[in-house]
Image (cartoon, rainbow, N blue to C red):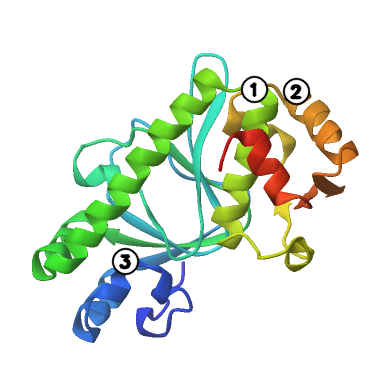
Amino acid sequence: MTNLNCEQCDVLNKSIFSAIELSGIKYISNKKCCISYKKGMPIFCSGTMPSGIYCLNKGKVKIHIYGSIKEHIIRFVMPGHLFGLGSIFTNHFYCCATAIEDSTVCKINKEDFLSILNGYPNLSLKLMTVLGQHVEYSNNKIISIAEKSVRERLAEGLLSVYKTFHGEFPVSNADNSDKAIILSREDIANFINTSTESVIRTLSELKNEGYIIIKGRSIFLKNIKGLMKIAGIY
C-alpha cells in the first residue's frame, strides 16, 4: 500500500475532483489510501459491504457481474474515473470490480467522500452527470444485446472499448496505427454477451474483410467508419 499526492496526480484532470479547489484536493489526498492490484485481482465483489469510493490512478479495471451461467462485463474503467459509486446509496456492492492489468487504485471512505460533496455543490452536479451517463450507457447496452446480431454487437463493442481506452476516434485511420485494444477474447465475449468461440470466429471475419488488424492479443481498428456502419452507429 502506497500513498500518492493528489495535487500532483497525472490523471487529476480526468477526474471529477478537478472541479474543486486546492484545499479540497488536499483534504482528499490526506484521507485516501492507495492500493496496488495485480492483474486478475478482485478489488471488491458483489454482495460485500462497501467501505468507500474508488478512483483508478493507473491500469485498467472491469466492472462485472456473475449470472447463473457466465460472467457479464458492464463496462471498463480507465485512470481518473471513479467506480464503486453505488455504495453511496446502498449498503452493498451490486457488482464486482477486477483489475485486468496491474493497477493502482485510490480509495476514500464514504463519509469523507460525502463530506467533500457537501462542501462542493459543483462536484455533486458532476457526480450526477457521471451517474446519468452510466444509466444511459447501460440502457443502450440492453437494447444492443436484445436487438443486434453478434457481428453488430462485436463491432459496437470494439468501438466502445476503443473510445474508453483511447478517447475520441481519430480523424483518419492512419492516426490509429499504434492504438490497440488488448483484451482477452473471453472478456470481449462477456462484454458483448456471446460465446468466446463466436468472438474468435467473428473477429476473423472482420479481419479478413479489412475492418481490423489482429496481432496476437492486440486488435487494431483499421476501418472505423465501416465498423460504425456494421454496428448501426451513424
In the picture as drawn, the residue positioned furthest to the left comes out as: 118
Q: Position of residue 19 (x, y in %)?
A: 26, 74
Q: Position of residue 28 (x, y in %)?
A: 26, 73
Q: Where the C terminus falls, by quadrant?
A: top right
The residue indicated by pointer 1 is 194
Asked if one can make out residue 115 in the rendered structure from this viewpoint, the answer is yes
Q: Secondary structure at mark 2?
A: helix
Q: Secondary structure at mark 3?
A: helix
Along the viewing direction, whichever of 143 and 43 lies nearer the viewer: 143
Which label was assigned to residue 16? 3
The amino acid beneath tag 2 is: Ser
Q: Residue at x 56, y 61 (%)?
A: 168
Q: Residues within 10 Å of mark 2 (few under 14, many from 20)?
A: some
The amino acid beneath tag 3 is: Ile
Which label was assigned to residue 198? 2
Asked if one can make out residue 113 in the rendered structure from this viewpoint, the answer is no
Q: Secondary structure at mark 1?
A: loop
Q: CA distance from mark 1 to mark 3?
A: 34 Å
Residues marked 1 and 2 touching at CB (< 8 Å): yes
